[in-house]
Amino acid sequence: MLGRLGITPARVVATDIDESPLKGERARDHAVRLAAEKARAAAALAPGAIILAGDTVVGAGARILPKAEDEATARECLTLLSGRRHRVYSAIAVITPDGKLREALSETILRFKRLSQAEVDAYIAGGEWQGKAGGYAIQGSAEGFCNWLSGSHSGVIGLPLFETRRLLIAAGIYVR
């Protein structure tokens, strides 16, 4: 997705942080905290570099939906989201070489159509849900479940391009 902004990362670093929600933590706060923690962890591995990190969290009511690692979790998420609105929070954090942290948050509201059991079964069989927040990937066939969206489509995919572009420009990076 960074390629859409004319950016090719010099290095991609996986960070190992605990992504468990804190007790009472709201979905939006969870996304912002995780993006900042990932940025700080990456900055420790690459001192003096410009660091971009992010996290996407799906919230339904007061619940933070997990990243689906198994079929049962994906099915539970899709069943919960069926026929209702939910929010996707995509937070990004940029750390500049001088250590300054800048953050931004994209909030998107989506509504899924009421899903039949056959639709859920077919989606699960396709495997797009694996490792995805809320058990779905909007950039795949789950986009056909979404009958209304207000906010950032790219934020639901996982990198809100408007906010990312703004933060990178503020950090002194040329972005087309």
Image: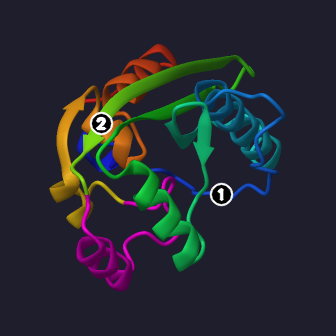
Circle 2/circle 1 CB separation < 8 Å: no
x then y, percent, for residue 11: 57, 56
Label 2 residue SS = strand
Between 94 and 139, the residue placed more toward the observer is 139
x then y, percent, for residue 147: 15, 43
Q: Quick one: label 2, few (<14), some, or many (20+) residues within 10 Å?
A: many
132 left or right, relative to 127: right
Q: Examine the structure image and report whether residue 15 is included in the region drawn in magenta.
A: no
- Residue at (28% x, 26% y) in the render: 151
- Distance from the alpha carbon under mark 2 to that under mark 1: 30 Å
Between 126 and 122, the residue placed more toward the observer is 122
Q: Quadrant of residue 118?
A: bottom left
Q: Which numbered mark, 2 or 1, is in the foreground of this view?
A: 2
The image's mark for residue 171 is none
Q: Compared to 139, does 162 lie above or below?
A: above
The amino acid at mark 2 is Leu
x then y, percent, for residue 58: 50, 42
- Residue at (48% x, 35% y) in the render: 90
- Residue at (43% x, 69% y) in the render: 129
Residue under circle 2? 110
Asked if residue 119 shows in the view, the reply is yes
The amino acid at mark 1 is Val
The image's mark for residue 13 is 1
Quadrant location of the C terminus in the rendered image: top left
Q: What segment carries the magenta color?
A: 115-136
Between 119 and 44, the residue placed more toward the observer is 119
2 left or right, relative to 26: left
Q: Quick one: label 1, few (<14), some, or many (20+) residues within 10 Å?
A: some
